[in-house]
Image (cartoon, grey):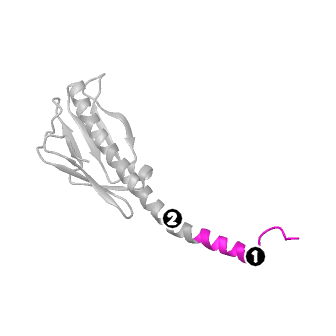
Amino acid sequence: MGRKGFSMIEMVVVIILIGLIASIGFPRLRDSLEKQNVRSAKALIATLAATARGAAIQRGCSATLNITVDSVWVTACGVNPPAASVSVGTKKLVGDEFNVTLNSTGGSVVYDPRGIATVFQATTVRVIGPHYSDSVMINEVGRVSKQ
């Protein structure tokens, strides 16, 4: 008649194997999550640049893509009255949402009513995570050329 269950040695071996697999898998999972956060922040910046261009064209006035160390937002003239500057959409707290910081060559990109940047200078926004970084390039006319 055989005994039922596992011996203590078998249980210890299984626990050691689980620990070994977890020690290999968790760092790779963390790195892939960090890369995804940087990519998501880049996509958000590109989307908000397109939003600023669209708002400038649609409203017929200047619109601004504002960039700080931890947030990005768009401002443009209000519809009623047209002279007041209002926020288009909500301010995106990129630092809190994606655990990244932003480093921009310019603090903002201003678009004229035609959707063209007013300062003909390329702007690079660097998205920096704890171990991984990438950048978004807004060209001289205000279009996202590298994402």
SS under mark 2:
helix
Instruction: Give 97 or 37, whichever is nearer the viewer.
Output: 37
* Residue that protrudes farthest toward the left in the picture: 120
* Spot occupied by residue 104 in the image (x, y as percentages of width and height): 25, 53
If the image is split into quadrants, where does the N terminus sit? bottom right
72 sits to left or right of 64: right
Residue that appears at 42% across and 52% down: 98
Q: Which mark is residue 133?
A: none
Q: Which amino acid, by three-letter code, is at mark 2?
A: Gly
| Label 2 packing within 10 angstroms: few (<14), some (14-19), many (20+) | few
Q: Which mark is residue 8?
A: 1
Instruction: Give 100 or 79, whichever is nearer the viewer.
Output: 100
10 sits to left or right of 71: right
Q: Which amino acid, by three-letter code, is at mark 1?
A: Met
Residue that appears at 85% across and 71% down: 2
Q: Which residues are magenta?
A: 1-19
Residue that appears at 35% across and 50% down: 39
| Label 1 packing within 10 angstroms: few (<14), some (14-19), many (20+) | few
Report the Cα–Cα distance between label 1 and label 2: 26 Å
Kindly indicate the quadrant of the structure image that contains residue 34. Answer: bottom left
SS under mark 1:
helix
* Spot occupied by residue 76 in the image (x, y as percentages of width and height): 27, 32
* Residue that protrudes farthest toward the bottom in the picture: 9
Figure check: 80 above or below 35? above
Give the residue pinned by disc 2. 25
